[in-house]
Image (spheres, rainbow, N blue to C red):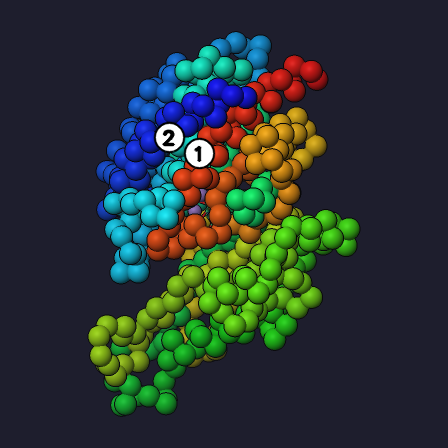
Amino acid sequence: MKQVKEYVNANKQRFIDELIELLSIPSVSADPAYKKDVARTAEWVKKSLLDAGVDKAEVIPTAFHPIVYGEKIIDKKLPTVMVYGHYDVQPPDPLDLWTSPPFKPVIKNGKIYARGACDDKGQMYMHVKAFELMMRNKMLPCNVKFLIEGEEEVGSESLGVFVKKNKAKLQSDVILISDTDIIANDIPSINVGLRGLSYVQVEVTGPNRDLHSGVYGGAVPNPINILCEMIASLKDKDGHITIPGFYKDVNKVSDKDRKELARAPFSLKEYKKDLGIDDVIGEKGYTTPERTSIRPTLDVNGIWGGYTGEGSKTVIASKAYAKISMRLVPNQSPDKTIALFTKHFTKIAPKSVKVKVIPFHGGDPLLLDTKFVGYAAAEKAMITSFGKKPIPVRGGGSIPIVALFKKELKTDSILFGFGLNSDNIHSPNESYGIFNYLKGIETISLFHQYYAEMRKKK
Ligand code: BES
Ligand code: MN
Ligand code: MN
């Protein structure tokens, strides 16, 4: 489709400038200090939808961060594509590891560097620009709804409430989401599964106050030492999680499916080199790609307590804390997993300390349908734009709302992401390739054409 490529080419500088403007607003959802900036970003997104040509757009307040909704209904008899994305971003810390400030986007080596460049402002905005492209070229073939939220990085709680209350408004034939990655720029892929999530904070209390580590050391429980021992015991030497019942509901992946998934190219040597590690770890009996997709896992995301300032302070802290995530695979339940964790963690605590487990947000794991028109259209769009058939892969991250879309709206989603592992999402120096950004706009525009066509034939 010639107009698509031509329009992208003719407008690419403006597309980049607009994204830079969006990336300059620090929409950190986790930190209440940024609440105003998050709200400002929602208004910005709403205006961008109106400029691109939606009939109506609104910023909908919620208990926490606003949702942006917009729609263009051209004919009720035509199919409707709903686009989901998020305009909130992860905190930029640690700031000193950024080579340029996280909210002052710069372009280097063909990539835009900024927090949210890939996750998810850059990827979300591709949809706004693809929509603009179709409007300006009079080639929008279907109805489009936009549902863009500001709480994805903190668990999408408000959106969950909104979806349950607005089922009619959010009716669509397929949900299109760009918030995942491809294997490489010359190896397109489509995520057909995501892991779920259970997240907890634990608190271990020893003595009723901080103590001199010389006067008391050796005789009283040190909550930091004890927390470390407890955490260490959560995995055995084979990398198995030791929480009783943790694997009970895990769906085993058949040898045939494992073979199929192993077709995605992967080099362990390059993986290690890229990360600067001499060896990988993980559950015995599974490959590295399997360990990050079809198997559940448990990781400490943060641990603190005692003195962490400059120099030394001799002290036994009264309390120690850790934030722990568990990535889940199909058929595991986030609530059940938290219950199992809490029971076990409380049980393994020695009598000398008290333990508190605070549950945070979670999300269901999912496997997506690939045998429907939406997937076929996505595949065809990538074949046209990349010149190669995308490989179906299962992703390790989580987008909790996707399982809820299926459950509440009964609508299938397509994870049409264009990021790369090297984009450093959630990490300092996040980036998004200009190639990926423009290729995404092109491929999304094609998706709409093929989807509408294929629906007609059916
Ligand atoms: N876009 C990511 C999820 C993702 C990234 C999936 C790459 C597959 C490949 C999303 O913004 C994210 O980070 N989700 C959180 C979940 C949440 C509840 C905080 C995650 O996975 O940690
Ligand atoms: Mn994301
Ligand atoms: Mn994210």
**Which residue in the structure is indicated by mark 2?**
12
Specify few, some or many for label 1: CA neighbours under 10 Å numbering under 14, 14-19, or 20 or more: many
- Report the residue at 26% width, 39% height from top: 25
Q: Amino acid at mark 2?
A: Lys
Q: Which mark is residue 321?
A: none
Residue sitting farthest toward the right: 256
Q: Amino acid at mark 1?
A: Leu
Q: Which mark is residue 438?
A: 1
Image quadrant where one finds the N terminus = top right
Where is 161 relative to 423, above or below?
above
Where is 453 relative to 82, above or below?
above
Q: Are marks 2 and 1 in contact (CB under 8 Å)?
A: yes
* Residue 226 x/y as whole percent: 43, 77
- Report the residue at 46% width, 61% height from top: 324
Q: Nearer the viewer, residue 257 or 320?
A: 257
Q: Is residue 427 left or right of residue 451?
A: left
Dividing the picture into quadrants, the one containing residue 413 is top right
Helix, strand or loop at mark 1: helix
Q: CA distance from mark 2 to mark 1?
A: 7 Å
Sequence order check: which comes first, mark 2 or mark 1? 2
